[in-house]
Image (tube, rainbow, N blue to C red):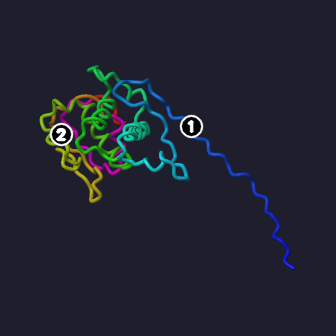
Amino acid sequence: SLVPPKKIETAPPAKSITPPMPNPMPSSSIPKITPPTLRPTSPTPEASDFKCDNPAERDRLISNILLTVSFPETLVGNQQSMSASPQHQAMRWILHTDALQLNACDEIALIQRYALCTFYYSTNGDNWERRDKWLSEHVECDWEGVSCDGSSRVSGISLEHNRLQGPIPKETFQLHSLVNLVLYSNSLSGTIP
């Protein structure tokens, strides 16, 4: 006769502790930022409707991704205020103006575009001498002074003698393939993050 196998006792699975996502003050220009919900395992109308390019989810998902690279207080600003942070201006541009309307699930491309937009706004990009294709429908690799590697990752920024003014934002260093940063003969301030 067969003897049933003994039940092997194991320790209970470790519980994952996820810190709550910081929730910036509500602003009319940014959606309420809440952690993304996980897709249920059983099909429900909600789950089947979830898509990375779903306009109803896109702004919230992008805002949550940007919170991983910027401090929450830098993303909050009054849309009508001229003193909005460069991070807030870059987020607004990506959410509402950018003709590419990147897919919310392409995190690497989204962070790259956001980092360059933040750099643009932080260094007074509207007053640069050369800013061809910046903040346009073109991919970042086509923007003036930006070079990319074979994977379309930013590997260099060369904007010397270009009237850049202001600090280099910390988001610039989210460009993990960046190996050349040539910015001499500008009016940059602060420290390199």
Residue 140 image offset from top left, x and y in percent? 23, 47
Task: Single out the residue that lies furthest toward the left.
Answer: 129
Q: Which amino acid does label 2 sit on?
A: Glu
Residue 127 image offset from top left, x and y in percent? 16, 30
Rate crowding at label 1 as few (under 14), some (14 to 19) or many (20 or more) other CA atoms within 10 Å: few
Asked if 11 appears above or below 113 in the picture, the reply is below
Q: Left or right of 70: which side holds 157?
A: left
* Magenta stretch contains residue 78: no
Q: In which quarter of the image is the N terminus?
A: bottom right
Residue that mark 1 sits on: 19
The range drawn in magenta is: 169-188
Circle nearer the viewer, 1 or 2: 1
* Magenta stretch contains residue 178: yes
Which element carries disc 1, helix, strand or loop?
loop
Which element carries disc 2, helix, strand or loop?
loop
Q: In which quarter of the image is residue 166?
A: top left
Q: Residue at x 45, y 27 (%)?
A: 24
Task: Single out the residue that lies furthest toward the bottom.
Answer: 1
Q: Quadrant of residue 29?
A: top left
Gap in angstroms between the C-alphas marked 1 and 2: 42 Å
Q: Which amino acid does label 1 sit on?
A: Pro
In the image, which disc is placed on residue 160? 2
Q: Left or right of 68: which side holds 86?
A: left
Q: Residue at x 37, y 44 (%)?
A: 54
Residue 13 image offset from top left, x and y in percent? 69, 52
